[in-house]
Amino acid sequence: MLALAAAACAPANDTSTASPGSASPAASATCAKDQLPLTTAGKLTIGTDKPAFEPWFKNDDPSNGQGFESAVAYAVAQKLGFTKDEVTWAVVPFDSSFAPGPKKFDFDVNQISISPERQKAVDFSQGYYTVKQAVVALDGSKFAGATTLAELKDAKIGVQAGTTSLQAVQQVVQPATDPSVYNQQIDAISALKNKQIDAIVVDLPTGFYVTAAQVENSKIVGQFAATGETPEEFGLLLQKGSGLTSCVDKAVGDLKASGELAAIESQWLTGSAGAPELK
C-alpha cells in the first residue's frame, strides 16, 4: 500500500509525461488475435500487484472485472479479441514491473505513471487515466460537504511542498488564505488529524490511501483536474520492444474515442468510490 501512495504522488518536477507510450518498431503489423505474440499461447496474461487495492480492484481479486483497473484491463482484452475466460492474471510487484528484462505478462496494470526514465526500460500504452487532485477533510467538518471549488475558498488547506498538488491549490482552488505548506506529506496529514487545517489536497490515488489507511473518519470531499501543467498519466506497461505495444495502444485509444474509458472512470473512480467532481 505504501508503494501505491509513493507511486501515485507526483512531485512538480517529476518527469511524467502525457505523451503516448513508446510503441516499438518491433510491434506487430497486425492486431489479429491469432497473430499476437503472447506469453502463453491462447491466453492474455495481465500483471498487477498483490494485494490489489480498491477502487482500482475489488475484493483483492483482479479477475472479477470490478474496480477501475480490472474493468479497463478486461475492456482492453475484449478489444484484442479475448473473452474473460481467456484472460489470466500474474502477481507482479510494483517495483519489478518496470525493471529492465523479460516479463512474465503481456501487459501490466498497476497505477504506473508514464515517464521518460521508465520508457528506457519498458514500453507503455498511451495513458488510460489522467491523475486528478483530491480534497480530503475530516468527516462532518465544516468543508466536508463542499460540492464546488468555490466553497473551499475560505478553507485552510494543507499541501506538501514541491508537488503538483501545491500548484493545483494555487492555480485552481485559489483559497483566500495561502495554503499551509509542509515538507513531508505525513506532516500535512498530522495537521489534518489535529484539526490545525481544514483539508489537505493530494493526488486522487493518494487520497484513496489516506482515507482508507491513514486518517480515521476522513473522506474525499471531491476531485478536480489540475491545469497548466503536463498531466501525470497511468499507462499499461509492456516489455521493451513488445510486439503487443501498438495493439494495446490502439485498444486504449479506441476505448477513449468511444467514451467507454470515461464511463469506466465515472463508475469506479467517481460514483462508487465516493469522489465526486468539484467544479
Image (tube, grey):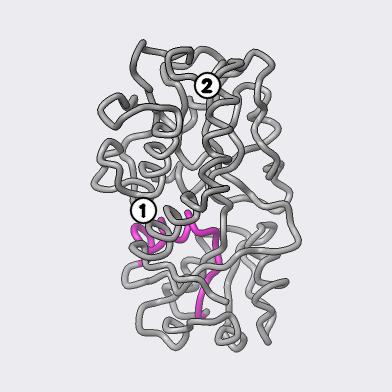
Q: Magenta segment: does it hold 214?
A: yes
> Is residue 277 placed above or below 123 in the rendered structure?
below
What residue is rendered at 53% in x and 75% in y? 278
Q: Position of residue 43 (x, y in %)?
A: 34, 18
Nearer to me, 236 or 264: 264
Name the magenta segment's main secondary structure: helix
Q: Position of residue 168 (x, y in %)?
A: 67, 67
Nearer to me, 229 or 68: 68
Q: Position of residue 6 (x, y in %)?
A: 52, 46
Residue at mark 1 to residue at mark 2: CA–CA distance: 30 Å
> Is residue 217 placed above or below 79 in the rendered structure?
below
Residue assigned mark 2: 31
Location of the N terminus by quadrant is top left
Magenta residues span 198-215
What residue is rendered at 41% in x and 39% in y? 75
What residue is rendered at 49% in x and 42% in y? 111
Q: Amino acid at mark 2?
A: Cys
Number of numbered markers? 2
What residue is rendered at 55% in x and 47% in y? 256
Label 1–label 2 contact, CB within 8 A:
no
Numbered badge on residue 44: none
| Foreground tag (1 vs 2) | 2
> Is residue 27 placed above or below 134 in the rendered structure?
above
Label 2: which secondary element? loop
Numbered badge on residue 55: 1
**Left or right: where does residue 257 sit relative to residue 105?**
right
Q: Amino acid at mark 1?
A: Pro
- Which quadrant holds residue 228? bottom right
Location of the C terminus by quadrant is bottom right
